[in-house]
Amino acid sequence: MSFSWELRTTSAAEPSASHRRRSWVMMRIASRMLDLGMACDNGPPPKFPLWAVYGVSDFDVLGRPIGGRAEAYEAELREILSWHGDPARAGIPLHKLTTPLGWHVTTVECRSAVRSYDRARAAGIRHPRIFGTELVPFLRTAAETGGFEVH
């Protein structure tokens, strides 16, 4: 199994970028991000909405719900996928980094992670090898373009 972090862009004209890694590597990355204050543990993630409660009867070929209050279901799902948890905790919530369920890592969370990384580097902490050369530039871009999704 692998993870893919996909940039969320604001227009179709912008190039989309991704950061892909195997799941065991992503777990190590998440652990190092937590060590550096780039990630936070906000407890268990929120529960996904039950589509049947919204009267959704099926999903089309693109995965969009059909029937009932499909729009309300999608709105609730979008809110949950962006949920941060405790606003006093800075960084990217661990549940977004460790489960590839379509979580939306927001620009605020990306900016916070980048600030924590920069503070750690300024304090003399070495760049974690597990990050490679692409992770931090990816986060910097995501902080300015709309965040990213985890799949």
Image (cartoon, helix red, strand yellow):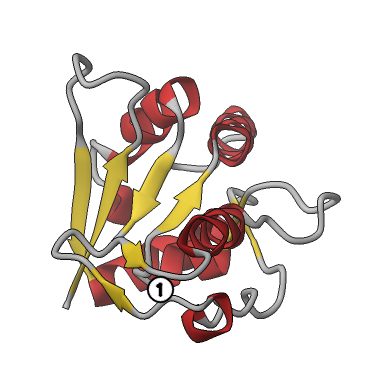
Indicate the quadrant where residue 24 lies.
Answer: bottom left
Measuring 55% from the left and 66% from the top, which residue is drawn there? 94
Quadrant for the C terminus, please: bottom left
Residue lying at the far front of the rendered structure: 68
Quadrant for the N terminus, please: bottom left
Q: Is residue 66 left or right of residue 31?
A: left
On screen, residue 133 above or below 151: above
Q: Is residue 130 left or right of residue 38?
A: left
Q: Is residue 128 visible?
A: no
Measuring 45% from the left and 42% from the top, which residue is drawn there? 126
Measuring 32% from the left and 33% from the top, which residue is drawn there? 138
Q: Could you say which is closer to the camera, residue 124 or residue 127? A: 127
On screen, residue 133 above or below 50: above
Q: Amino acid at mark 1?
A: Thr
Indicate the quadrant where residue 48 lies.
Answer: bottom right
Measuring 20% from the left and 34% from the top, which residue is drawn there? 17
Q: Could you say which is closer to the camera, residue 133 or residue 5? A: 5
Q: Could you say which is closer to the camera, residue 29 or residue 49? A: 49
Residue lying at the far right of the rendered structure: 88
On screen, residue 149 above or below 14: below
Where's residue 141, x and y in %? 37, 24
Indicate the quadrant where residue 28 lies.
Answer: bottom left
Q: Is residue 86 visible?
A: yes
Where's residue 57, x and y in %? 36, 80
What residue is disc 1 on?
99
Badge 1: residue crowd in 10 Å (few <14, some 14–19, many ≥20):
some
Number of marks in the image? 1
Where's residue 13, x and y in %? 19, 14
On screen, residue 106 above or below 51: above
Q: Secondary structure at mark 1?
A: loop
Q: Is residue 51 left or right of residue 6?
A: right
Where's residue 109, x and y in %? 60, 41
